[in-house]
Amino acid sequence: MTSSTALNPPLDTNLWSQNHLAHVEQALTLWVGDGAPAGLGDAMRYAVLDGGKRLRPLLVLAAYEAARSGSSDSAAPEGAALDEAALRAACAVELIHAYSLVHDDMPCMDNDVLRRGKPTVHVQFGEAQALLAGDALQAFAFELLTPDNTLIPAATQAALCRLLARAAGSAGMAGGQAIDLASVGVALTEAQLRQMHRLKTGALLQGSVLMGALCGHAAPAAYEALSDYGAAMGLAFQVVDDILDVVADSATLGKTAGKDAAADKPTYVSLLGLERAQAYAQELLAEAHAALGRSGLPDTRALAALADMVVRRSH
Amino acid sequence: MTSSTALNPPLDTNLWSQNHLAHVEQALTLWVGDGAPAGLGDAMRYAVLDGGKRLRPLLVLAAYEAARSGSSDSAAPEGAALDEAALRAACAVELIHAYSLVHDDMPCMDNDVLRRGKPTVHVQFGEAQALLAGDALQAFAFELLTPDNTLIPAATQAALCRLLARAAGSAGMAGGQAIDLASVGVALTEAQLRQMHRLKTGALLQGSVLMGALCGHAAPAAYEALSDYGAAMGLAFQVVDDILDVVADSATLGKTAGKDAAADKPTYVSLLGLERAQAYAQELLAEAHAALGRSGLPDTRALAALADMVVRRSH
């Protein structure tokens, strides 16, 4: 097993992200809201386009490339089929993320009026349209994964739907949100807080990694290691989110700062204190890197860079 | 081509429905909310179990059996694989239907407090939990269609997800709801009203038929005829819904009667008048039966009975 840095020159992370995001943005622009009635399509596009870090799509594509780097046919020209699957998976995870934000922001949930520096969807389009746009985005994620063509093998389509449904559902993101809902004003143990976050944000982040690994035909051992990477990185994401909620201001975050404390929600900062939370984020980052080392994959530079970005981001 | 009645004795529709619903109810009871955090699981089960006509699951199973009756291996003992797929498809369409009702009933949509004679989910569990339960039910529908086993071929899993995603999404149910939302107080033409209902309720009803036909390996011509059946029956369902909203009372309906007129929503009754709406429902019923005749399938008795039930129901 060799680490990714031993064999490869440093990755220009910005350039890598820009190149890959260009494909994702183009595909989302083309696909989202296509065929939808006018008002609904507008709300769907507003929720998805022109905003966000696109962390989940980048994780899909980075995991796809890492897996490909370790496959026996990696020297062969990349097949259109695999690219198509990874691109669709990248868009699908972003649709699930976008729908969850639309519903999360609604008055009956977090009642947020600002998201990515813009009015939230229900402020812009009304609550009913926001509810429907979220619902339609979730359905569209699964539609994207199941094109009626032979470019993506049926087994890949089914496996991608399986991973995404589990990551999004009651034992994943939606389940974590429900625990979150029930936790306001409740003193959680660290284990309970970790479980909540593993589901609420971790499941879809880890699911993104796994969907990319699947598209890249990762061998079982590599798939396991990437799964560990996804778990550590996903939890790190949430610890850092909790930290930023305390130390950053709303302008930097692009959303309302300090709302967790104001809502009396348990966070890693309220549980561990700021310093220990910051140290914990570093530990999880080290775990993520260690998992990449264990993967045996020759090139995990993009995944490594994304984990670094998750922990070192300012918003 | 022979009609279903020429070759087969009359079907005991009640017995057929009871037998098939027993499997669906047992499966839903086993599966829904399993693995979900307590509060969320309760809301999901409340939304799905113990209520509803289960029309969509019955359509899946009836179409499955009709397709099987025409397949060359119909004399062979029924494989576990096909039964498993049809049962999961039957449950999945009901989950989509149930989630749409939960979200539809919310204050920002129809603001309904009564459903199937019980308080609606948001009245019982709060709006936030209702929103999440709906979201989780949609994800769970796709989870049910993609079990991690080989009982259901990957191609079937992928095709079922494809049909369900399209039926549920912005060019299906959610799209129809958005048109509905934009139509309050607006004078629609009959063509516009038909398009709204084709999406809002027709897409999932027709999708149910197609998913069953797919599980039963319908030949292309039979699949097309069943698709026509689904379209006519789906539209008939909505015409009758509009009629019942005028002629039935809330106790019989199990939901608030007269709400379309009160909300100034366009309906077939407001557009055509009661008598012509009733005649139109009969025309559509005849179209549905004609499509079954065209299917060439030896036994379409259950589908025929379900279409009759749709038009002759009192709630």
Image (tube, coloured by chain):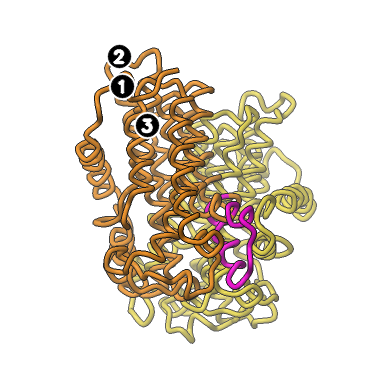
Chain colours: A orange, B yellow
Pick whichever of labels 1 and 3 is earlier in the sequence.
1
Residue, disc 3: A149
CB within 8 Å, label 1 to label 2: yes
- Please provide the residue range marked out in magenta: A172-195
Instruction: Find residue A208 and report its image quarter.
Output: top left
Left or right for B14, reference B307:
right
Query: Where is mark 1, residue-wise?
Result: A79
Tell which of B242 and A206 is nearer to you: A206
User: Tag 3's secondary structure?
Assistant: loop
Image location (x, y in percent) of residue A49: 27, 55
Prevailing secondary structure class for the magenta stretch in the rendered image: helix
Determine the chain carrying the residue at label 3: A
Query: Residue at coordinates 34% horizontally, 24% vertically from top-left?
Result: A299
For disc 1, the chain is A
- Residue A246 belongs to the span the image colors magenta: no
Q: Are marks 3 and 2 on the same chain?
A: yes
Task: Assign a secondary structure to mark 1.
Answer: loop
Is residue B159 shown above or below A52? above
Residue at 76% x, 50% y is: B26
Labels 3 and 2: the sequence-earlier one:
2
Estimate the x, y position of residue B162 in percent, counting from the top left. 46, 42
Q: Is residue A178 magenta?
A: yes
Foreground of the two, A167 or A227: A227
Where's residue A90, x and y in %?
A: 36, 41
Q: CA distance from mark 1 to mark 2?
A: 8 Å
Q: Secondary structure at mark 2?
A: loop
Front label number (3 vs 2): 2
Question: What type is the residue that disc 3 sits on?
Answer: Asn
Which amino acid is tagged 2?
Answer: Ala
B280 relative position to B297: left or right: left
How many numbered tags mark residues here?
A: 3
**Which residue ends up furthest to the bottom in the rendered image?**
B262
